[in-house]
Image (cartoon, helix red, strand yellow):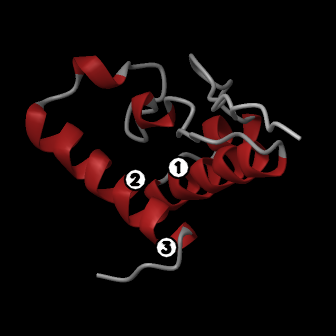
Amino acid sequence: MTTQPHIKTTVVGSYPFPDWLGALPSEQAVIDATRVVIHTQEQADIDLVCDGELYRFDVIHPDCGFWMLKRSIADGKIAVLVKGRDLHHGRTA
């Protein structure tokens, strides 16, 4: 019996921001939303999960795209998302 090669799956593009993230924006809310997005993909057996571009969400100015932020703010947001990802995977710094 020959086994077929496994084709890895992923998602492309942005997930919609949850209403609760826009209503009460905070760094913790972005981490929580990222966990939800990753968990949803894991439940669907997606091989290569991503954050659904939630890194673009700005807790200070929710309508402002990530690419419009100062570098220091953008770096801080990325650090928070990395921390959330690591916590989700059981890794600690």
Q: Which residue is mark 1?
A: 30
Q: Which mark is residue 81?
A: 2
- Res 47 quadrant in image: top right
Q: Are marks 2 and 1 in contact (CB under 8 Å)?
A: yes
- Res 79 quadrant in image: bottom left
The local secondary structure at tag 1 comes to helix
Taking 45 as reference, is 63 left or right? Answer: left
Q: In the depicted view, which residue is nearer to us: 90 or 70?
A: 90
Residue sitting at x 53%, y 40%: 51
Q: Is residue 43 above or below residue 52?
A: below
The local secondary structure at tag 3 comes to helix
Which of disc 3 and disc 1 is earlier in sequence?
1
The amino acid on which the numbered mark 3 sits, given as a three-letter code, is Leu
The amino acid on which the numbered mark 1 sits, given as a three-letter code, is Val
The x and y percentages for residue 7 are 67, 28
Q: Which residue is mark 3?
A: 87
Find the distance from the CA under tag 2 to the CA under tag 1: 8 Å
Which of disc 3 and disc 2 is earlier in sequence?
2
Find the distance from the CA under tag 1 to the CA under tag 3: 13 Å
